[in-house]
Image: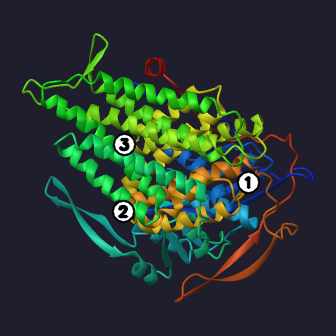
Amino acid sequence: MYLAVLLTIILVASAPALTALSNSEDGFQASCESIIVAVSSSGEGATGRLIVTVRYPGEGRVYISTSPASQLDTLGSARVAAFAASLAAGVDMSSLDFYYVLESKSIVVGGPSAGLAMALATYSLLTTGSCLDGYAATGMILPDTSVGPVGGLKEKLEAAASSGAKVFLIPHGQEKYTYIARKVERNGPIVRIVSTPISIDLVEYGRSLGVNVIGVSTLAEAAEALGLPVPEARVPPSPSQQLTATLSQYTLETVNLARSLAGDSDNVLAQKALELSDRALDLANDDFYYASAVYATLAYSYARASIEVSEAKDGDFDVTELVEESRNSIAGVMEKLGGIEEVTVANLDAVLKAYGVLGEASYEYSNGLGMLVEKNGRYFIPVSILGEANYEGVLRVSSALSLARWAGLWATVAEASQSGAPLEGAVLEKLARVMESQAATTTAYVIQIGSETGKRGYERAEYLVSLALSTKDNPLETAGYSIEAIAAASSYLHEAFTLDPEATAQGITALAGYIASRLPEDSSQYPKAALASIDAMEGIQLLLTSSKALLYLDAVALALGIGEKPSSPGSNLESTSTETIYVTTVTRESTVTVTRTIENMVPVEHGVEAYSIAILLVAILSLLLGAAISRMLR
């Protein structure tokens, strides 16, 4: 097995509350308090306190203290919340430290449903220096700032209303909610629990309770619903003509190769390859260059596998040539990337993308190899005792070969785009450290959620983060694997939980366009190309493409120092302990009045220590993974 040994170490220490610290010209601290809602062990809605503190300067650390107790995934949710809030606010997370205190008298605190509340409070601090009163929020938060579904919404709405909240933010798509009503029936000594599903319109129910219920797809939508400042939605900039020409040429060459291979076969895989080839050419004719290249890559993987299937039907089950071709292709692209002398603003995203795709190729290769039969150094398609062949391993190894070809394209783009000053080693090391840390945390988070829900599919993220953690001498390789690991974890969460992919993608694309507009014109050609093809996609593919593009844009912004040193949030930070009433229009139909409290906000010293419950999530690569990779790249 290649799977990494993923260890979660939770360090616990007694924690005094953070207090105002001594002045410094370079630092600041902001704190605020809001409510959280949850469902108690008795099945009733309950509330608790959430206290969030953001401190600059910091090192990207996230501390959390819970009372009386917390679920394990609350720890991961806190770090994802800090990451998402920083991304949405355009701030470098690694320049800050984040402190979360969750308290409740009657409930076990947290779980994924506390993510939106933590992210929203953090975002509010980063953009205004304060938090709003009069609202409650529940929802899972994802690294790409999207909001995922949670349970117990009826009970949480009732708890929010009881606490005096006038606005209740929930995941979009759950406005029409079905809950289970349980009734105990007794007949003498026999006790029976009858469960009945009941559907309810939470917007209407909230109105009867005096609460405005609003469904949100992203963190920015949640912020906008409360009247907080949000990034200006912008159309993503177009990629360079040089890149579109390169993608067009790649599509044409790959389609021709796929058609040539598929034309020699007569099976389902060959037919699929031809269909994907036609789709790729149609997209290219409509100027969707990135989408067409993706379909061409898929077409080639099916076409190459179709050759092995045809030969197997003729009695030849030996696929050693395919295995060696895939292995050599991955190694060849790795060598090509190693020969790039300078990494600059112009080619950083292409280098990261190439390494990330190589990580995907390695995952497919490793999985495919495990599905084949190895004998005396040669590999064969497995055949059951009934004579039925299993072709999944062949398709996986063929996919690895095709992905290596795709990675090679981005390596070529990187080679041709070395203009500008090279990025310093310290910058790349920082990028690798930040992305690796977030990848490890996010992956541990989704594994925990997967174990609780029984939904598997996170193995890709687990493998990629293991690759990232095993690569210590090349920060670009580490960062590329890490970004793809975060993207794979987000993909798992979206495919398992997202209810309205297109609505969520719209919000993510708007944020991606804003970040892209802040970057130099010659940078981030890969994300710009991906976003330019958004209209060619639909459903979950639309969402996953926009999500991955956003993560790569964030990595480039981090490397360029955009948002590295945030100014003290809000223009009114000199004021302390004052209150101002703001009227915030939440919808066309209703207006709510909320109280914005400007919290004590004073500078802090660099060396001041604060103690809390620290999250340290460390993934350790198993020796088996190292052996597998060594064998693969030999």
Residue 54: which numbered mark, if any? 1
Counting from the top left corner in percent of width and height, residue 20 is at 84, 53
Residue assigned mark 3: 457
Q: Can you say which quadrant of the picture contains the N terminus?
A: top left
Tell me residue 370's x, y (percent).
Answer: 32, 25
Mark nearest the camera among 2 and 1 is 2
Q: Residue at x 79, y 44 (%)?
A: 421
- Image-based side of 183 in relation to 570, left or right: left
Q: Is residue 100 left or right of residue 484?
A: right
Answer above or below: position of 613 versus 622.
below
Residue at 45% across, 38% down:
405
Question: In the shown orientation, is residue 510 left or right of residue 209?
Answer: right
Q: Residues within 10 Å of mark 3 (few under 14, many from 20)?
A: some
- Front tag of 2 and 3: 2
Location of mark 2 (residue): 282
The residue lying at 36 percent from left, 42 percent from top is: 457
Quadrant in the rendering for residue 203: bottom left
Residue most extreme to the bottom: 589
Task: Out of 604 and 557, give the one closest to the viewer.
Answer: 557
The quarter holding residue 52 reads: bottom right
- Most foreground residue, 371 or 297: 297
